[in-house]
Image (tube, rainbow, N blue to C red):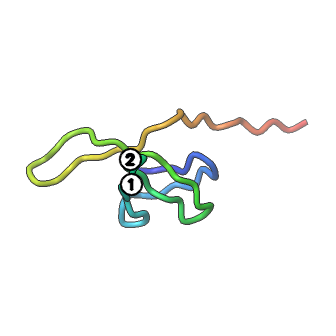
């Protein structure tokens, strides 16, 4: 699962977002807010490159009723 680091929208995989490579590295663009989210290579499985999302940890903020 992938999650946008800005709007926290979740995506089940690369059927919903498309990985891209440019001079800054590998990433996907969030279709909801347009934020660039970094990806990294973690290995190979035959001819398939395995990638995962990287970046700051996303810690949900609890909602407190006052």
C-beta proximity under 8 Å, tags 2 and 1: yes
For the point 62% across and 61% down, which residue is it? 33
The correct choice, above or below, for 40 with respect to 10 in the image is above
In the foreground, 12 or 7:
7
In the foreground, 40 or 3:
40
**Residue positioned most to the right:** 66
Mark 1 secondary-structure assignment? strand
The correct choice, above or below, for 14 with respect to 25 in the image is below
Crowding at label 1, few (<14), some or many (≥20) Cα neighbours within 10 Å? few
Q: Mark 2 points at which residue?
A: 25
The correct choice, above or below, for 65 with respect to 35 in the image is above
For the point 45% across and 45% down, which residue is it? 38
For the point 28% across and 42% down, which residue is it? 41
Left or right, 31 with respect to 25, comes to right
Query: In which quarter of the view is residue 12 placed?
Result: bottom left
**Quadrant where the C terminus is found in the figure:** top right
Mark 2 secondary-structure assignment? strand
Question: x, y (%) of residue 13?
Answer: 38, 58
Query: In which quarter of the view is residue 16 placed?
Result: bottom left
Q: Name the residue under label 1.
A: 22
Question: x, y (%) of residue 49?
Answer: 20, 50
């Amino acid at each position: 699962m992938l999650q946008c680091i800005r709007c926290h929208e979740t995506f089940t995989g690369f059927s919903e977002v498309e990985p891209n490579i440019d001079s800054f590295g590998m990433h996907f663009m969030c279709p909801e807010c347009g934020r660039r989210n970094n990806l990294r290579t973690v290995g190979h499985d035959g001819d398939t490159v395995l990638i995962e999302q990287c970046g700051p940890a996303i810690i949900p903020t609890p909602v407190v009723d006052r």
